Each structure stands twice: as C-alpha cells, then as structure tokens.
Image (tube, grey):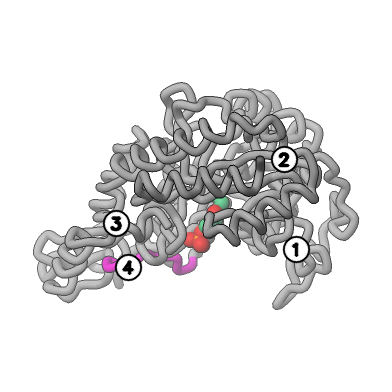
Amino acid sequence: MPGTELFGKEEKEQVMEVLETGILFRYNHDEQRKGIWKAKEFEKEFADYHGVKHCHMVCSGTAADAVSLAAVGVGAGDEVIVPPFTFIAPVEAVINCGAVPVFAEIDETLCLSAASIEAAITPKTKAVLLVHMVGAMAQIDEIVEVCNKHNIILIEDTAQALGGSFQGKMLGTFGKVACYSFDFFKLVTAGEGGAVITNDDQVYTTAHTWSDHGHSHEGNNRGAEEHAILGTNYRIGELHAAIGLAQFRKIDYMLERLRANKKVLKDYLKKFPQVTFRQVPDEAGDAATVLNFFLPSQEEARKACAELSAEGVAAAYWFDNNYHFIKNWNHIKDCKVAGPVGMQFLDKPQDYKNLDLPKSYDIIGRLVSVNMSITTTKEQLEAICKAFDKVLA
Ligand SMILES: *Cc1c(COP(=O)(O)O)cnc(C)c1O
C-alpha cells in the first residue's frame, strides 16, 4: 500500500516535534506551540502543490466529502449526481446532509461520463459529486462543460487520484471544490485525515468554520470568537497532520515509482489479445496507483482475478466487493439508516432497489484491477508478468 511503504524517520521527526510542544490541537495556544503548526503547514503545501488559493484539512476523506457539500450549500431537498462505482463515502455524505443521491452511469474511464450526467439532471439537481476512480481521471473537460451549461456545481472527490492531472492541470482544480482522503489505504496517508481545496474565498470560509463549530479562527481567544454559522467537528489533529505532511513531501517520488511500475506491467499486458484497458483521458496525468483492465466477460474477469490473487498478485474484483460498487449496497437500497434521512421523505428521483445501470454493471463486471506499489522490485515485476502469463495466456 503506497504511502505506508515509505514510513521512516521523516514521519517520526514530524510527530516528535508536535509531542515536544504538547499542543495536539491545531488552533490557538500560540505561545506554547513554539511556532509548530502542522495542519497549517500541510494546508499551505497542499494548496501550493495544486496551485489553488485555499486548503482546509479535516479528520477524514468522508468528512471532506461532507464539508465540500456543506461549503457549496447542498442540503435538504437537493439532488446530487453520484457514480455507482466509488468508495461508498461520497454517497453516505450526500444522504447524511439531507440531499438525495442520483446514480448515473459510468463509462470506460470508470467515472461518470458527461452524457450520463446530462441525462440525470432534473430541476432539483444542485451538484455533481464526481469521483476520479482508481488512480486516474474522468473525462473532466467534457464534465466541466456540462456543469457550466446547466449551472450545476462540480465537486471533485479526488481521494483516489491525488497527484493526477489532465492536460497539465491538477485534478481537483476543475470544480468549485475538491476533497481528498489520507486514510491508511491512500497514496499519502496520515492514518486518518482529509482535505478540501478551493479557489473560492466563501467556500473556504464556510469549510473551515463549519468543520469547527462555526469558529471564525480569528485571534487567539477561542472562547471569544463569533460563530457566523452553526457547525460541527471534523477537525484534524496535529499528530495526524504531522504524519500527512511528512508523507506528502514524498509524493513526487511515490508517483514516479508507481508510474514506472505500472508502465512495465501495462506494456506487458498488451500482448494478450483479450485484454483492453481502462480509458485514461490523459495518460501523462495518470496517478498510476492502480492498473485497470477489462476482459471480455464477467466470468473471465472474476476467474482471472481469483487466479491472480492465488499467484500473490494484488488483484481486486470490484464487482463482487461490498464497498466500491452499488450491486451489494443493500443498506442503501433498503434505506437502513440510524435515524430518518431526507431520502425517506423527499420525492425519490430513483427506485434505489431496482436501479437500471446496465452500462456500469457491464463495465465493472469485466474489470480487473491490480494495485501498484512503490517498492516493487524488478524481480517482483517479473513475477507478476509470469503470473499474467499463467492466468491469461
Ligand atoms: C477513501 C475514500 C473516501 C473516504 O475517505 P476516508 O478518509 O476513509 O473517510 C472518500 N472518497 C473516496 C473516493 C475514497 O476512495
């Protein structure tokens, strides 16, 4: 798993700096913290990397999804277009903010397509929560165009494509706001953590105040701060921010290794006539955390994935997985919730139990994913190629 492969003295040093001051809280305590502001430092570097004005760190990627929705004003009664192939978090965030998810089809980019978004728009559509899935980008230029045409807010969930770009522009900078995760399984990990980035001053202000009980974050007296809006607590702590910062400083190396390893394996797979590849709209901007390819049928993909796993290859078959594809999301289809949510009361735009998404089912049914890692050796790459021969030839 990428980031975790590189834990070293840098992470330890960052954590120790925080522990030495004892200030684990990201705000205030200006004197005691002796100039150590890990969350702020991480925010500055993360924003600069993306070439945007603002970044706000939060406690998880799921929190970042929720903050993004709140910051652009999505709430009760709104519809938000979402993909059926995604880690489930953005869909949870939509439901938990009182809005209703509207599932649209993905295409061979493994992301929502502009055409499917356009077809799903109703007068209640407020936003699209686009997820750049498994390491690479959606056809983002076309999606921006559709959102602009219909005056719909574009939110990019870039948790799985950090470091990716499209025609030289960083993913996460195409919409009004974007969210990231630094959970244990992501490219850059803080253990737990998330980020929101934006160029919009108002979105940023709402994001940082809403995720900390409405605090304005002005001055050094927390008790005296005005509360412009009601909020909640999705704060990141200094220890997590410290680890995230050390990890993030390794991102260029991570991406370089992942891209090199993926190229070897992808080039090798080209010799099998039955293999086709996930469409990547700009290969140069591939974050390359995952190698994704299609086989002609569901049966072949499921079998190949099981056989590759048995050979020790980090293969995944998302179609049967409980958290990345809608097929097994019975708790959402049956609306099993802790307490009442908007989805139960508002006019449901879709029958979640009987969703008709033939294209997405066909594409994900044929998809095999192989997770890349940073520290894979030449010998290990050769062993994976041998496994490809054994399973696919
Ligand atoms: C991991 C992930 C999240 C959620 O992140 P957490 O930090 O685990 O809460 C959200 N969206 C996508 C696309 C993800 O892959």
Assess mark 1: CB under 8 A from ligand 1? no
Can residue 176 be seen?
Answer: no
Mark 2 Cα shell of 10 Å, populated few (<14), some (14-19), many (≥20)? many
Mark 4, secondary structure of its residue: loop
- Residue at the location (29% across, 56% down)? 6
* Relative image position of residue 121 (x, y in whole percent): 78, 36
Q: Is residue 13 above or below residue 102?
A: below
Q: Is residue 44 left or right of residue 22?
A: right
Q: Tell me which numbered mark, 2 or 4, is placed earlier along the sequence.
A: 4
Highlighted range, magenta: 232-239
- Residue at the location (66% across, 53% down)? 305
How far apart, in angstroms, are the residues tagged by discs 4 and 1? 32 Å
Q: Tell me the mark number nearer the camera, choosing from 2 and 4.
A: 2
Mark 1 Cα shell of 10 Å, populated few (<14), some (14-19), many (≥20)? some
* Residue of label 1: 329
**316 and 81: which one is in front?**
316
How far apart, in angstroms, are the residues tagged by discs 2 and 1? 24 Å
Q: Tell me the mark number nearer the camera, choosing from 3 and 2.
A: 2
Membership of 29 in magenta stretch: no
* Residue of label 2: 295
The label shown at residue 6 is 3
The amino acid pointed to by label 4 is: Gly
